[in-house]
Image (spheres, grey):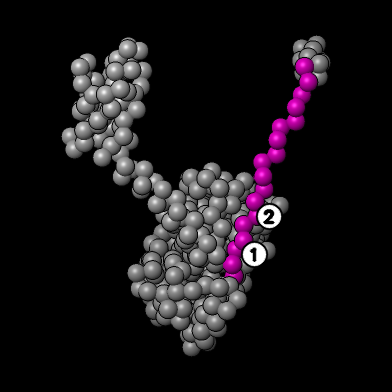
Amino acid sequence: MAFAVATPLGRRSSAVTGIPLFRPASAGVFPATARHAVVVPPRAAAAAAEEGNTSPPVVVSRRSVLSTAAAAVAGAVLGATRGVTPPPPAAARSGLPLFPLAEPLVNRYVFMRAAESAVAVEGVTATNPAERLSAALHGLTPRGRETVAAAVAHLAENLDVSSDAWIYADVGAGAYETATHLAEGLGVRPERLIPEFAYLEARGVGALNGAPTEAVATALAEGEAAGGIGWRPDPAEDGTPNESLEEVFVRGRQWLAKMETQYFCDTIVVVAPDSSVLQVLEAVLRAAPGGVADHTAYAYAPGEAREVVPVVVPPQEKPRVGLADALRTYTATTEQ
């Protein structure tokens, strides 16, 4: 069934079939779509004819009305049952996030760094993507597995993360093994454990790859202090990427945009192989005064997990300038 409303806009086409809609001059029946016919009561048809309205009706199907109402009710119910307050309509329109956030995010996020791995015990940096699947390098140690078990209890008891959460994990051996144990402990179904192939990988340190972890951290800090967030380590001969902080931020923001587009009022746990992407994203989500440059204040230890509550900074209104002030400014500028 469909409902019709007379309109003075003239000839129009069906949004469903693209067939032109015409209103016959001597009947109250309109060919609305290939599946529906729109019937207008005789009195309404006669009244419209006397007014000279020969345009077709605007067709709104009952299915579209009911589906829209059902979607609105479902969104409100999901938000209430999961403890997440649905955002205002403007915030629900997903896109590339701008920082500092002017509107709340539509999902809840828990960040976690992969637990201790074999290469971490050796104190060596290994960020070559060709080695990210190596269990010998990035597989969890017994202490790392114990850390994950403690993280499961922390997420369930303190952060209210339940089995209906989504877990996104880098495909690297350490991060994905961490996420697998996390999902088992929380009772998260396998289809809710999603591998991430690009956005969450460890920061490529270029020629610093293979150097001691402390020496790499010092070199990165000195380079960023001198060259800013666009500074890169020297390139490597073994193919290890040499990423700047800005590049890490870009792929982190792209991942966040994908989450905000794909999910609504959900709890999302993200597991990354190192701290780089997590601390850069947290710095901008918490509206750190220095933005990305303040990322070291939000560093994660192996196996550490915490909820990131974004800081919303409403846009400031532009001050109103009176006409006299504007004219004085213009006159002073032209006289100079």
Three-letter code for the amino acid on which mark 1 is drawn: Tyr
Residue at the spot x=38%, y=62% of the render? 197
Magenta segment: 306-323
The answer to which image quadrant residue 245 occupies is bottom right
For residue 113, which numbered disc appears in the image?
A: none
Query: Percent position (x, y) of residue 159?
Result: 58, 72
Q: Nearer the viewer, residue 304 or 203?
A: 304
Query: Residue 220 in magenta?
Result: no
Query: Of marks 2 and 1, which one's residue comes earlier in the chain?
Result: 2
Residue lying furthest front = 43
Compared to residue 32, the image places residue 154 above or below, namely: below
Q: Amino acid at mark 2?
A: Ala
User: Where does label 1 land, which residue?
Assistant: 298
Q: Measuring 44% from the left and 67% from the top, which residue is drawn there? A: 166
Circles 2 and 1: CB distance less than 8 Å?
Answer: yes
Quadrant, the C terminus = top right
Percent across and percent down for residue 292 are 62, 54
Q: Is residue 67 left or right of residue 222?
A: left
What residue is shown with label 2?
288
Q: CA distance from mark 2 to mark 1?
A: 10 Å
The kind of secondary structure element at disc 1 is helix
Q: Residues within 10 Å of mark 1 (few under 14, many from 20)?
A: some
**Picture quadrant where residue 199 is located:** bottom left
Residue at 39% x, 46% y is 68
From this viewpoint, which residue is outermost toward the bottom?
142
| Secondary structure of the residue carrying numbered label 2 | loop
